[in-house]
Image (spheres, rainbow, N blue to C red):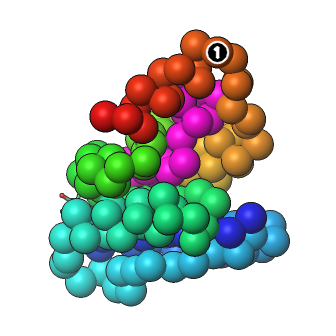
Amino acid sequence: MRIAMASDHGGFALKEGLKSYLTGEGHEIVDLGTDSEDSTDYPIYGEKCAEYVVSGKAEKGIVLCGTGIGISIAANKVKGARCALCASEILAELAANHNDANLIALGGRTTSLEDAVKYTKKWLATAFDGGERHVRRVKMLTEM
Ligand code: RB5
């Protein structure tokens, strides 16, 4: 799968680790930055990654900052983005199953690489439920 990734400095190390894992699993990763731990601004990267996904250049996106909070807020400003901050496997599963999340956010200072891999695997492996109520709610989000 073609997956876009972006982070600020707080998510940089986890982005690099997760990128290596996903590349090893055969995914095509588009790295939209940042490229170091030098201080930068998460809104730039949340917006960039969400626009990349919503425009169809990648199937899914993963955004990372220190907590995952700021960059998820930024990603969700882009119309059509459904970015879920994942801090457990059940959240990752339901983000896909109920919300059809096209992006997830992870916290580089709050989530180990081992857990980030677990959440990402669960999100990628879980299909959207597709039931009428979920389709209706996702459509409502898209139309906001
Ligand atoms: C940057 O220091 C930090 O505020 C940022 O990475 C993120 O945690 C914001 O939500």
Please, is residue 21 above or below residue 125 in the view? below
Please give left or right for residue 110 compared with residue 2 in the image: left
Q: Nearer the viewer, residue 10 or 129?
A: 129
x, y percent for residue 102: 54, 48
Residue at the spot of label 1: 132
Q: Tell me how many marks there are.
A: 1
Task: Judge whether residue 95 is colored magenta.
Answer: yes
Magenta highlight range: 90-111
x, y percent for residue 35: 38, 86
Looking at the rendering, the quadrant in which ligand 1 lies is bottom left
x, y percent for residue 26: 81, 71
Q: Nearer the viewer, residue 144 or 20?
A: 144
Q: Around disc 1, counting alpha carbons within 10 Å, would you say few (fewer than 14), some (14 to 19), or many (20 or more)?
A: few
Residue 140 at least partly seen: yes
Q: Nearer the viewer, residue 139 or 42?
A: 139
Secondary structure under badge 1? helix
Which quadrant is home to the C terminus?
Answer: top left
Please give left or right for residue 110 compared with residue 14 in the image: left
Please give left or right for residue 82 compared with residue 46 in the image: right
